[in-house]
């Protein structure tokens, strides 16, 4: 499968490593340019590209950059993607630690992924946002393994969500349907499921326990 990854930090880099190892055709981009991704490309066989080309021909695109940088993405960044492209948003809102106050989230009553959708002009599926990057490399397990971790996945496009859940299964993790993007607050920072290493039952329970109000530490 052709996969584009925008962002080559901890999550983006380790997804590049795992997805190429599984045989996928991965293009990876960051804000500093392809020349800064030579080592990752040599290690994995991924193709380093400018951000504008990351989605070209891709069936799945992963957007894994700091939330405050989403508005800086080039206009039409998803142009040229395959028809029906599924877009994974791994982003989190850290107003005090990194992003500053984002009025469109704070005042609009929107989840961070709904805000991201508005900038991308395309539906997203929220996944990997509460996953430790090293777990992507260290904790894959075969289906049915008693210690297999589950990840929450939220999105409005059921076909895209199903495709993402199948990819996560291929990566070695179970998934739990977290509802639509307006329900994705249940997996935002500060919620019980955020950073949780648990199976399907534990993740399902944690999503149900999430309080609807954003914790103080994650408000601007």
Image (cartoon, rainbow, N blue to C red):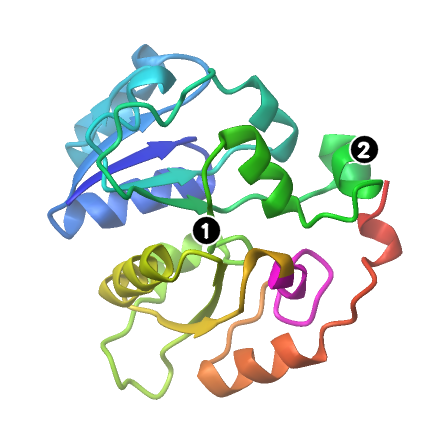
The part of the image, by quadrant, that contains residue 138 is bottom left
> Is 21 contained in the magenta span?
no
Does the stretch in magenta take in 184?
yes
Q: Nearer the viewer, residue 165 or 41?
A: 165
What residue did someone put label 1 on? 133
The quarter of the image holding the N terminus is top left
Q: Which residues are magenta?
A: 183-194
Q: In the image, 15: left or right of 185?
A: left
Q: Is residue 57 left or right of residue 214?
A: left
Position of residue 175 measured from the top left corner of the image (x, y, whole percent):
40, 72
**Label 2 environment density (alpha carbons within 10 Å; few <14, some 14–19, many ≥20):** few
Determine whether the residue tagged by mark 1 lies in a helix, strand or loop: helix
Mark yes or no: residue 130 visible: yes
Labels in figure, total = 2
Quadrant (top left/top right/bottom left/bottom right) for the C terminus: top right
Residue at the spot of label 2: 103
Q: Is residue 2 above or below residue 22?
A: above
- Discs 1, 2 touching: Cβ within 8 Å: no
- Name the residue located 31 percent from the left edge and 21 percent from the top edge: 37
Residue located 60% across and 23% down the image: 71
Q: CA distance from mark 1 to mark 2?
A: 28 Å
Image: 110 above or below 54: below
In the rendered image, residue 52, in percent from the top left (x then y), is placed at 35, 16
Residue 197 pos. (x, y %): 51, 72
In the rendering, which numbered label is found on residue 216?
Answer: none
Of 157 and 185, which appears nearest the observer?
157
Task: Tell me which numbered mark, 1 or 2, is placed earlier along the sequence.
Answer: 2
Image position of 77 (left or right of 114): left
Front position in the image: 23 or 58: 58
Residue found 26% across the figure and 31% down from its top: 81
Q: In the picture shown, does residue 100 fall above or below 115? A: above
Q: Residue at x 62, y 75 (%)?
A: 207
């Amino acid at each position: 499968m052709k996969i584009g990854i925008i962002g080559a930090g901890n999550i983006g880099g380790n997804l590049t490593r795992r997805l190429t190892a599984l045989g996928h055709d991965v293009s990876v981009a960051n804000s500093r340019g392809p020349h800064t991704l030579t080592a990752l490309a040599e290690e994995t066989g991924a193709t380093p590209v400018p951000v504008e080309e990351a989605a070209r021909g891709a069936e799945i695109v992963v957007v894994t950059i700091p939330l405050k940088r989403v508005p800086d993405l080039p206009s039409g960044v998803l142009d040229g993607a395959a028809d029906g492209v599924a877009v994974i948003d791994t982003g989190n809102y850290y107003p005090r630690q990194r992003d500053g106050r984002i009025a469109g989230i704070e005042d609009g009553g929107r989840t961070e992924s709904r805000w991201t959708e508005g900038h991308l002009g395309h539906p997203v599926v929220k996944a990997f946002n509460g996953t430790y990057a090293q777990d992507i490399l260290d904790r894959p397990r075969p289906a049915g393994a008693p210690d297999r971790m589950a990840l929450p996945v939220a999105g409005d496009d059921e076909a895209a969500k199903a495709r993402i859940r199948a990819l996560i299964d291929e990566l070695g993790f179970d998934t739990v349907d977290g509802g639509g993007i307006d329900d994705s607050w249940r997996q935002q920072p500060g919620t019980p499921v955020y950073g949780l290493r648990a199976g399907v039952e534990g993740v399902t329970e944690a999503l149900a326990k999430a309080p609807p109000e954003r914790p103080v530490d994650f408000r601007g």
